[in-house]
Amino acid sequence: MSDPDRARVLAAAGVSRETAERLDLYVAQLRRWQPIKNLVGPATLTEVWSRHIDDALQLLDLAPEARTWLDLGSGAGIPGLILAIAGQERGIRVDLVESNARKCAFLTETARLTGAPARVRNARIEAVIGDYVGTDVVCARALAPMTQLLAWTEPLLKTGTTGLFPKGRDVQAELTQAGAQWTVVNDLVPSRTDSEARIVRVTALAAPSHR
């Protein structure tokens, strides 16, 4: 079945024919594995290009010079595996950290089939985060509140890594709560897929206050 949003999303992203074919393969894999692994909300499969592909691709524009990316709680590879597929021609490499072995099986097989420059790690975030100091960008989608995301990524954000965290309508409340524990330098970028959503771009982080 052809998704009516496919052409619009691909045109807006300006990807090559080869990249479009790899994204098509990702979508086919997602639909094939979904009944077994429950990777995404079933209703979103009918809008996979607008709800998932475009939502991931917009992150590339927010860090155009970045070459090394880390995606936490990768799940179905959104945004990490999609970023690896779409960013391959600009030399991007993405590490995907996921604690669920069943989802890692999907990520590993789909990365292999698409030839995406992605490495899958079946691990808990807190056990491996220190390995990624010096990474250009860390991202996570629909994983945890900002306070928890900052706690996990502190070693990276304090040493120059940029954080890109897509959030919904409660983003300001999450940032207010996080601000009670952290000094966060960030800006909010409007999402091009949801008028109420924002992408939190964190460019610096200070240690928690112990007052």
Image: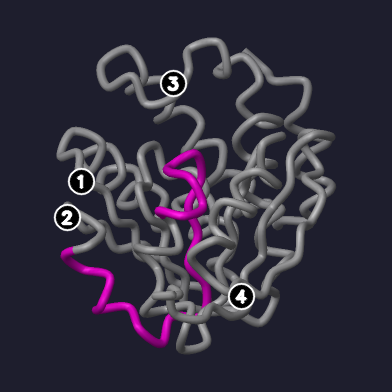
Look at mark 3 in the image and give the residue it sits on: 31
| Relative height, residue 173 to residue 205 (above, below) | above
Foreground mark, 1 or 3, reads 1
Query: Which segment is the magenta one?
Result: 127-148
Foreground mark, 2 or 3, reads 2
2 or 39: nearer the viewer: 39
Is residue 164 toward the left or the right of residue 118 in the image?
Answer: right
Q: Considering only order in the chain, which callout, 3 or 2, is on the residue closer to the N terminus?
A: 3
Instruction: Locate the C terminus by quadrant.
Output: bottom left
Residue at position x 48%, y 45% in the image: 145
Look at mark 2 in the image and give the residue it sits on: 123
Distance Cα–Cα, label 3 vs label 4? 27 Å
Q: Considering only order in the chain, which callout, 1 or 4, is on the residue closer to the N terminus?
A: 4
Q: Amino acid at mark 2?
A: Ala
Residue at position x 38%, y 55% in the image: 72
For label 2, the SS is: loop
